Amino acid sequence: MRGSRRRNAPQEASRKATPRSDSPLRQGLVISHLGKGLAVESLEGEIILCHTRRRLGDAAVGDRVLWSPCEGDQGRVEEVLPRISVLTRPGYAGKIRCVAANLDRVFVVVAPSPEPDLLLVDQYLAVCEHRRIPAEIVLNKTDLAGAQAAGALTDYERIGYPLHRVSAKAAIGLDELKQSLQHHCSMLAGQSGVGKSSLTNALLPDKNLRTGEISEKSGLGRHTTTAATLYHLPEGGDLIDSPGVAVFGLAEMSGQSLAWGYREFQEYIPRCQFNDCRHIRDKGCAVREAVEAGAISAARYERFLKLLDKLASPDDPV
């Protein structure tokens, strides 16, 4: 019976906890989702299990919030403070779910094996451009024969995306990557098998201790933090680990914003003959002319067309 009560702690908090009227609102940071509750870190570094008001909507890991203490050493999130950025993905029943908030860096991880999914890389980068979140690329597993994978990334270096060559297994390039993570709130993204978990464990040697602390404070057991969780990096900065989210999608993007998401297109889009140019077969399209002249990568342009088709398909979960 005791185990059952612990599992239902967030629901019980939502029904029974009452804010003390004499307690002022306090600032906090959402560091994890725990069932229907949130793990909120106070300014003093204490972790508090909180529930939320229904009207608040979708609070995300990384959100700065105002919360009030409740009975039983729990709390209630009263307000989500303004965000500087947010990443979203499709949820159930056509709803949009927040992946993470207040990110100021996304590191797209690729590797020699599995073969890089450059369409997915382009999707990540386009979303980051749209959300105005700087993005960088990490080539992991450089201890393997990765010359072909590195060659496929030259287009990204050419248009200004920083490229980090690392190996979590062989501890190659990790110091440089840690420097790039300092003073930022970051997230790793990438297809399955590229070594995101190995990189996260290398960057966060005390990750399991922190996860255990969050689970203990929640009263829900050690295996509750399977969703996104924010960790403080030893060298400074924060890393949001989101193992359950392989993709943040093109939700809320139009064909025009997707084109602007290809940063090398931005110089040419204003030169198109028509303001609503789709950059496909439109007359006077400066983007297509730049592709034909070799100023824009033909491979990147072809992947743009594929994402445009994906965006236009109502049955395709982008």
Image: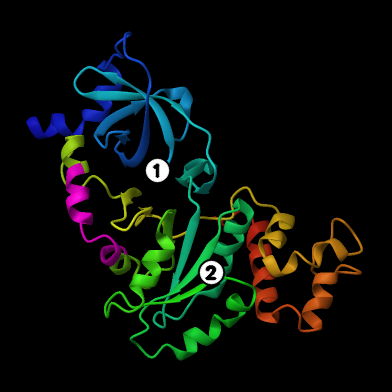
Q: Residue at x 18, y 36 (%)?
A: 217
Q: Return the residue nearer the eye: 233 or 61.
A: 233
Q: Which residue is mark 1?
A: 61
| As drawn, 112 above or below 305 | below
Residue 245 percent coordinates (x, y)? 41, 55
Q: Amino acid at mark 2?
A: Val
Q: Amino acid at mark 1?
A: Val
Residue 72 percent coordinates (x, y)? 19, 20
Q: Is residue 156 left or right of residue 37?
A: right
Does the magenta-highlighted stretch encompass residue 202? yes
Per the rendering, the mark at residue 232 is none
Image quadrant in which the N terminus is located: top left
Q: Residue at x 36, y 76 (%)?
A: 173
Q: Is residue 178 left or right of residue 105?
A: left
Q: CA distance from mark 1 to mark 2?
A: 23 Å
Q: Can you tell which quarter of the image residue 297 is in?
A: bottom right
Q: Which residue is mark 2?
A: 121
Q: Return the residue nearer the eye: 196 or 183.
A: 183
Q: Main secondary structure of the magenta part?
A: helix
Of the numbered discs 1 and 2, the one sitting upstream in the chain is 1
Residue 294 percent coordinates (x, y)? 76, 84
Q: Residue at x 81, y 67 (%)?
A: 268
Q: Callout 2: 10 Å neighbours few (<14), some, many (20+)?
A: some
> In the image, which residues are magenta?
200-213
Q: Secondary structure at mark 2?
A: helix
Q: Residue at x 27, y 80 (%)?
A: 170
